[in-house]
């Protein structure tokens, strides 16, 4: 098994939740199974990679390797786009894990509008607070479990998942049984990535919804639509009203 192949497969798996080996040769598939990364699941013809311990071990090795790094792979694929898999979005997700490892002040990472910052009668001090990336799981509604996420650690081997419906997005927000850090909503939702930050000062949780656009490469109309897509009243603007009304939460735009 080549380390470069392992690098590509592991990063894809931990971002999106699973990886089938249907495009690999039988020899490569056998190697993934032999080393404990993959297995055959009942009812599925292709071997899938979803074994947490080998995945985490490989991730640690790749992260500290001087030859293969996640950012080399992600930078290489930043302009590659498949159905529901966007290279730029993947890069941003891993960037968030890295940049919030030091719990920086929020306004050092995001640029807030001047008129928003000057808005009277609002408590906007949180813009200057230190925030860390976290995963929130609501096994107990009154006492949610909050896990700090860094490039070295997290509550699960999968840091992200591709939500197939609005209901799956709502499950991630309200319950998050699988303890996933990043949600990639369906295209009709509006935002491209969702995650949660926690203030080091107050302990408050802040939902962040990201629109992944290279702002220098798109015109003004597209940028306006991107900003609207992370505005709560525009979520699922032409879809299920029940889903949209449940997503009235705090949003931050990242362009």
Image (tube, grey):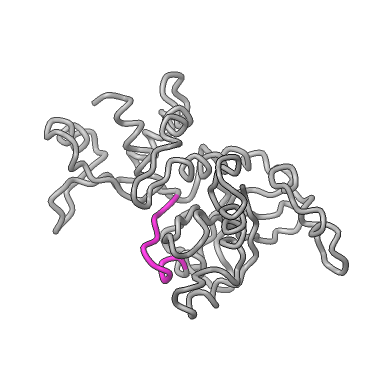
Image height check: is 16 above or below 173? above
Locate residue 236 relative to residue 59 in the image: left or right: right
Residue drawn at x 54%, y 60% as measured from the top left: 136
Which residue occupies the foreground of this view, 14 or 164?
164
> What percent of the width, then of the height, locates residue 249?
62, 68
In the image, is residue 42 part of the stretch drawn in magenta? no
Residue drawn at x 55%, y 77% as measured from the top left: 245
Locate residue 182 relative to residue 44 in the image: left or right: right
> What percent of the width, then of the height, locates residue 58?
37, 33
Locate residue 28 relative to residue 76 in the image: left or right: left
Residue drawn at x 35%, y 38% as measured from the top left: 10
Tell me if I can see residue 76 in this picture: yes
The quadrant the N terminus occupies is top left
Residue reaching furthest to the top: 67
- Range of residues picked out in magenta: 160-169
Residue drawn at x 49%, y 54% as measured from the top left: 192
> What percent of the width, then of the height, locates residue 117?
82, 57
Which residue occupies the foreground of this view, 249 or 18?
249
> What percent of the width, then of the height, locates residue 79?
44, 37
Residue reaching furthest to the bottom: 242
Tell me if I can see residue 97 in this picture: no
Which residue occupies the foreground of this view, 195 or 88?
88
Question: What is the number of callouts on the image?
Answer: 0
């Amino acid at each position: 098994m080549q380390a470069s192949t392992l690098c590509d497969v592991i990063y894809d798996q931990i971002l999106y939740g699973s990886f089938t080996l249907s495009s690999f040769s039988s020899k490569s598939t056998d190697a993934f199974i032999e080393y404990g990364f993959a297995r055959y699941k009942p009812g599925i013809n292709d071997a899938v990679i979803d074994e947490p311990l080998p995945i985490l071990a490989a991730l640690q090795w790749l992260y500290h390797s001087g030859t293969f790094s996640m950012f080399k792979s992600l930078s290489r694929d930043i302009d590659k786009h498949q159905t529901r898999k966007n290279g730029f979005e993947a890069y941003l997700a891993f960037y968030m894990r890295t940049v919030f490892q030091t719990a920086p002040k929020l306004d050092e990472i995001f640029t807030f509008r001047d008129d928003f910052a000057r808005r009277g009668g609002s408590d906007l001090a949180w813009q200057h607070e230190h925030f860390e990336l976290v995963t929130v799981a609501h096994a107990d509604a009154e006492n949610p479990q909050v896990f700090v996420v860094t490039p070295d650690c997290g509550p699960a081997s999968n840091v992200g998942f591709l939500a197939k419906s609005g209901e799956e997005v709502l499950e991630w927000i309200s319950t998050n049984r699988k303890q996933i850090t990043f949600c990639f909503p369906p295209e009709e939702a509006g935002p491209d990535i969702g995650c949660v930050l926690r203030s080091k000062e107050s302990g408050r949780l802040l939902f962040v919804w990201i629109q992944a656009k290279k702002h220098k490469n798109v015109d003004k109309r597209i940028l306006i639509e991107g900003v609207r897509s992370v505005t709560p009243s525009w979520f699922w603007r032409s879809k299920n009203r029940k889903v949209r009304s449940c997503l009235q939460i705090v949003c931050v735009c990242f362009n």
